[in-house]
Amino acid sequence: MHEEKILVLDFGSQYTQLIARRVRENKVYSELFPYNVPLNKIKEFSPKGIILSGGPASVYDKNAPLPNKGIFELGIPILGICYGMQLMAYLFGGRVTKSKKREYGRAVLFIDDKKDIFRGINQKSIVWMSHGDKILQCPKMFKPIAHTYNSPVAAIADKKRSLFAFQFHPEVVHTEYGNEMLRNFLFNICKCKPLWTMSSFIETTVDGIRKRVGKDRVVCAISGGVDSAVTAVLVHRAVKRQLTCIFVDNGVLRIGEAMKVERTLKRHFHMNIVCVDASRRFLNKLKGVTDPELKRKIIGNEFIRVFEEEAKRIKGVRFLAQGTLYPDVIESTSFRGPSATIKSHHNVGGLLKDMNLQLIEPLRELFKDEVRALGRELGMPEEIINRHPFPGPGLAIRIIGEVTPERCEIIRKADAIVLEEIKKAGLYNELWQAFAVLLPIKTVGVMGDERTYENVVAIRAVKSVDGMTADWARIPYEVMGSISNRIINEVKGVNRVVFDISSKPPSTIEWE
């Protein structure tokens, strides 16, 4: 599908996704593979270049992650970053040693060879370091091409074989000319062309869906989130009236959710939409359940049952479209070498076995911000494109403890206030997510002259680029004050509001 491709081999760095994203921002398609992917898979992928990511290991560790050495025989350019550089030096017979002084944070880079990968870059600039090992002796055929005060060998090159490596991270914003270095690798060394754009993605994806579906029918589950809405619009562009969207109200949605989605997709895109109110059914299943993973499973399974019942009423359905994204693929399958599954996702395959449907996942290679860019290219309204992510299990995982109709009502009202105040303050588009969480504890309060013993609501607001990492948002005190006052005064059953100041990692964005 993509002619010009870069493969990123993942050795467990916190910045690995960032490398793939930086490459894509330069209009070259890239994908992440685990470091130990078989060589035939790499050949099949047919990349124009390979980037070895950083990672927490040392090349001398007993179980140090090592790639298949055959990658260096493929005759394509390779760029090693941090651990990727130490690995390259080690595999080619250089000497790597523990650094006396661990280098972490900003460092001054001095370029000793301004050609090729450093073409057009200042001789002296700031780079971001994060390493404990360093190169003591360059391997044969390689030459040092840059240094820092602490690392005499901060970049190396074997120009004959187009092998390059950096001790620092060009993918992070703190590296002053990092993007220019990556561009040099992509365009001067790998000879890639910037062909990967959203309009080219739409063209090839629509064409692919059309050929695959033929005259059959497709069903698509829509949730109100940006992922499922963009999936629906993209598939609709390919097969028009052959698509039926099914919206299931699971009883744990936000205020006015079902109406908003139906109105937007019907009015703007003239789609077939079936809306099912199954709220009572879901809430009955959730009675007495407090375990978050069990909540997710119950909602996922019940969703499947409801969806199946509706889909079976439509004749000639052979395909199911769903909005799986690239981070979902990475998190859910533990596909990344050193990473672990964090939680089960709402996009589930249980339907396929029972219904004999084939899966269409047109967004499975995109990051969230790319999905938003795709939505804009498809002419979707900003109110859908810029919506904060909303979890598949909905408010059920923002109610810590049992999910009851009364507790749903509390969190729905509190959540609406959070969003209203955030929007009023002009902060909505700056934040990745902002929402309320209902805690399973009660605290003493005073309202009027009476003592109260009521619920606590926590406010979560984070900034992020792709949801893989996030930092808590520094919301102005006056906005926090308005949110707190309104929730305590307007939401019956709440007498205390707290603010969550944890980042991801180590915390996740959602509480459950």
Image: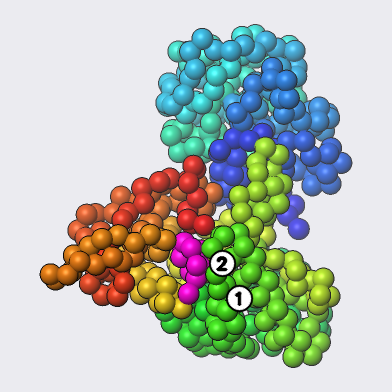
From this view, report whether residue 304 is shown above or below residue 21. Answer: below
Q: Is residue 46 visible?
A: yes
Magenta-drawn stretch, dominant element (helix, strand or loop)? loop
Instruction: Report how far apart the C-alphas of labels 2 and 1 lie in the structure.
Output: 8 Å
Asked which quadrant contains residue 290, the reply is bottom right
Kindly check if marks 2 and 1 are in contact, taking CB atoms under 8 A apart as contact.
yes
Q: Which residues are magenta?
A: 395-404
Asked whether 141 or 134 is in front, the reply is: 134
SS at mark 2?
Answer: loop
Residue depicted at x 64% and y 21%? 58
Asked which quadrant contains residue 216, the reply is bottom right
> Which quadrant holds the N terminus?
bottom right
* Tag of residue 232: none
Residue depicted at x 40% and y 46%? 502
Asked whether 443 or 42 is in front, the reply is: 443
* Tag of residue 289: 2
Residue depicted at x 69% and y 43%? 336
Whole-percent x, y for residue 302 in the image: 66, 75
Whole-percent x, y for residue 32 in the image: 68, 45
Residue depicted at x 30% and y 50%? 474
Callout 1, which amino acid? Lys
Callout 2, which amino acid? Val
Q: Is residue 158 visible?
A: no
* Mark 1 neighbour density, 10 Å: few (under 14) some (14–19) many (20 or more): some
**What residue is shown with label 1?**
285
Whole-percent x, y for residue 436 in the image: 38, 63
Q: Is residue 353 left or right of residue 245?
A: right
Q: Residue 308: within the magenta?
A: no
Q: Is residue 257 left or right of residue 270?
A: left
Asked which quadrant contains residue 198, the reply is bottom right
Asked whether 415 or 201 is in front, the reply is: 415
